[in-house]
Structure formats: C-alpha cells, structure tokens
Image (tube, rainbow, N blue to C red):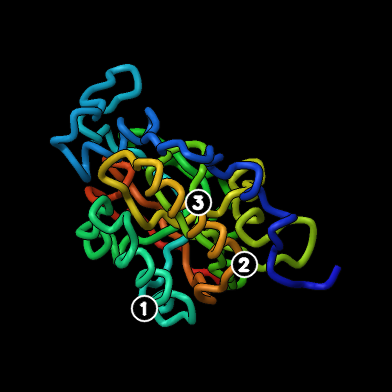
Amino acid sequence: MPGGYATAAELGYAAAATRFEPGAPLKLDESYRRAHLPLVAPGHPDIIAADAGRGYAMGRHDEIVSLVAPIDADALEAGPGWRDCLAELHASPLAAKIAWDILPARRGKLHVTLCGTLSRGVDPVLAEGIEAALCKMEPIRAEVRGVFSGTVNVGRLYLKLHPWRSGQADAFQSVQAAFGRPPGALHLLGLINLTDHLDPEEAAWLAAFLARWDERLIARIVVGELWLLGARDDLVLDSRLLRRFPLG
C-alpha cells in the first residue's frame, strides 16, 4: 500500500463532531465545565468546582502520566493557514469568549495525547521492549488540517492531525500499538478554550467557521520525539516532563 497522509475517511473526525442545531445556543458540556472551565473562567456560575468521584477540584486532579506527541509551536505558526485561522477567531463574535491568555501559557506544551493515563500519581513502569521499539520508529510526519469541536469537552476547539500512513495503521496508531493500546481515530491538538456558553448567533458563526476550516491545511509538521508527561490538569498548565523518547 503506497504511503500518504491519513485521510478524513480513515479517521473518525466526522462521526465525533459537535452537532449544531439551527437557531440553538451551544452549551458547554459537563466534562468541560468540570475540567476546563474552572481553569479559564473560575468565577463562572456553571463551573463544576468539585467532583470527588472523578478526582477534580477546580479543574485540578492528582498527577496523571500520559504519552504524548509534542507539537512544535514554531512549525505550527509558520504553516500556511495559521495566521488566517487565528485572525478569523480574533475578529469573530466569539472573540470575547475565548481564553486568549491560555495560548501563550500552553505554547511550549502543545501536544497530541497518544496513550492517556498510563499511571496516576506514580511514574509508570513501561513494558520491556517499548523503548527499543520507539527508538526504531521514524520521525512522524503529519498534516494539521482543519479545526474540530467534538461531542465531549464541548467548549474546546482542536486542530485535527492527519499523520503519515504507510500500511494498515497510521504512525500515531503504530505508537499506540507498541503500548498495547487500540488504534485511536482522533488525533487532536487542543488549542482554543471558551469562557462561556454561546448564544444562537455565536453558535451559528462557529458552525460555519468549522465548516469553512474542516479540511483547510494549517501546517505540516514533523514529530521528532515523544514525551512522558505528568499533568495535574487537563490543559497541562501544571505539568512536568518525565522522559523523552527520540524517534529515528
């Protein structure tokens, strides 16, 4: 099978996308109000300030360690679509409801999560042979193509990654297989956080924006290493880099 970037048909973005109802507002969902809203709008009346069953308190939790693919912010910002995408959002009806201060705070921590929750509160013990398998893998090429809003964490906008695919699995799925994880159909880079629900006009604008940007090329990137990242919140504002795994 010839190589190429994974296509939209081979990934799961369409099936997992937010469904916008004409004339209806867009409400931040429960997961977002628990994990994200306390971090970006701590005074909002609809935050879920505490959820002991899920381990959250004002958006924070005990450290969770995951394997992630770090995304170079310089490469992303140098892409052909980055400036236009951000300019549309800055000029949009949503601009006052976007947590713009989060972007510089997360610039050095941009990533796609490949294997979430490898451990909680302790450094993970990796199975024998995983590190050697990762070192044999080539750097991962990917296209950043389109903006995405899903059915979980409604209130967060992501960039969609289409990694290189040379067989039955794409490059990110090959990493997941090395860790004994099932292949993921969503390779998402969290980028924009809303600070409030959207009224019908704002929701309609967002739906149209997502449709315009669905497959537009934002950047082409190369992932040269993977990280074991420990984080105490879902925006990795409070996080630590545990290990690096160079690829190639």
Count neighbours of disc 2 (C-alpha within 10 A) and say few if under 14, some if 14 to 19, many if 20 or more.
some
Question: Which residue is most to the top?
Answer: 53
Q: Is residue 118 visible?
A: no
- Give the amino acid type for the residue marked by disc 3 in the picture: Ala
Tell me what residue is drawn at x 33 percent, y 36 percent.
Answer: 122
Q: Are marks 3 and 2 in contact (CB under 8 Å)?
A: no
The answer to which quarter of the image holds residue 234 is: top left
Q: Check disc 2 and report the residue beneath it.
A: 137
Q: Is residue 175 left or right of residue 48?
A: right
Measured as percent of width and height from the top left, residue 40 is found at: 22, 45
How many C-alpha atoms fall within 10 Å of the one at disc 3: few (<14), some, or many (≥20)?
Answer: some
Q: Residue reaching furthest left?
A: 43
Task: Residue 228: give x, y in percent of width and height.
Answer: 40, 52
Give the residue type at disc 2.
Met
Answer left or right for 202 relative to 220. Answer: left
Residue under pointer 1? 74
Residue at 48% across, 59% down:
209
Is disc 2 placed on a helix, strand or loop? loop
Question: Please, what secondary structure does the residue beneath circle 1 have?
Answer: helix
3 horizontally vs 197: left or right: right
Amino acid type assigned to the residue bearing label 1 in the image = Asp
The answer to whether residue 92 of the structure is visible from this angle is: yes
Q: Nearer the viewer, mark 1 or mark 3?
A: 3
Instruction: Mark 1 or mark 3: name the one nearer the start of the chain.
Output: 1
Q: Position of residue 172 (x, y in %)?
A: 60, 57
- Residue at which label 3 appears: 207
